[in-house]
Amino acid sequence: MRCCIHPPNCSSHAFGLADAVVVLAACAIVIALLSPSLAQNRTVARMMQNNTQTRGIHQGLFIFAQGNKRGGGDGYFPGLNSRGLIAEAPPAQEDGQHFGAVPGTASNDVAWLLTGDFIPAGSAEYFINPMHVVAEKAQPGETIRAPLDPDGPANFSYAFLDYAGLDEDGNPPPPGAEPLAPGRATEWRETINTQAAVISDRNTGANTEVGSRISSYWTEPNSGRWHGAVTRNDSSTSFEETPVLDDLKYGVVDPAEDHLFENDPVDDGRDPTANALLISGPRDVIGR
């Protein structure tokens, strides 16, 4: 007598190699379709985080200025003392960290913000662009960046208003000296010019030729294209697709366009010593 363990209308079919190939192929197609969307979502999330960080840094500038003023005047942002003169570098912290601060440069602005509770995140990581991806954290297809030197003059990802200027030898003024870019220094305080751009994503490109190799964390290195966050003195933050902006009203009220990283021409009716609007790290500014 024959015995069948399956119902009469039921057939048995093993999961074979062909079936596995079909499933794997389907999974590959789904992954291929979702990858661009996932990458785009990751970029948008980082863009939002980046804007939050630059706005938070600006809020830290204002908090610092509350205790960096004389009399009833507006307080100065870090890097200038209460008299509007070039500030000393902050003292070493308990761990001996000087933050690579150089008076008269953006590194000193960052160092002073790191000495107190001025930054929401409370750590140096707040000064690192979310798109600054190092090798151990990189996703497939992402641009890998070299780690920032925690003790160097470029240990942050953002550019700050150039209020100090440079002397004839290309050096910033020493502590206690008057800023060499007074037209910019007037903007580096609480409420003078709410439209002034005071923080942005830095220029990551090599500047051997003016403008031709500018780039940012959001574009290919040395591509000649810059995209990034810009925070103005009213704390408004926008993501711009060009470093050329209008209505910044630096110096005199002038609707002319301003390039965030190029030196101003000396014949435009504004302070000829103002140079570029924003500096970052070791003054890697176009035209410098």
Image (spheres, rainbow, N blue to C red):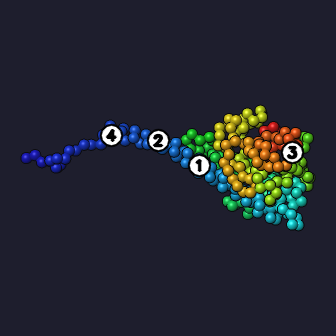
Mark 1 neighbour density, 10 Å: few (under 14) some (14–19) many (20 or more): few
Query: What residue did someone put label 1 on?
Result: 44
Q: Are marks 2 and 1 in contact (CB under 8 Å)?
A: no
- Please tell me which of labels 2 and 1 falls first in the chain: 2
x then y, percent, for residue 175: 89, 53
Q: Give, as a three-letter code, the residue at label 1.
A: Val
Give the total of numbered labels. 4
Residue 202 or residue 71, whichever sits in front: 71
- At horizontal 39% and vertical 41% (from top left) the residue drawn is 26
Query: What residue did someone put label 3 on?
Result: 270
Vertical relation: 31 (above or below) 190: above
Q: Quadrant of the C terminus?
A: top right
User: What kind of element bears circle 3?
Assistant: loop
x then y, percent, for residue 115: 77, 60
Q: CA distance from mark 2 to mark 1?
A: 18 Å
- At horizontal 74% and vertical 57% (from top left) the residue drawn is 234
Q: Are marks 4 and 1 in contact (CB under 8 Å)?
A: no
Q: CA distance from mark 4 to mark 3?
A: 73 Å
Residue 54 or residue 96, whichever sits in front: 54
- At horizontal 32% and vertical 40% (from top left) the residue drawn is 19
Q: CA distance from mark 4 to mark 1?
A: 38 Å
Query: What residue did someone put label 2 on?
Result: 33
Q: Give, as a three-letter code, the residue at label 3.
A: Arg
User: What kind of element bears circle 2?
Assistant: helix
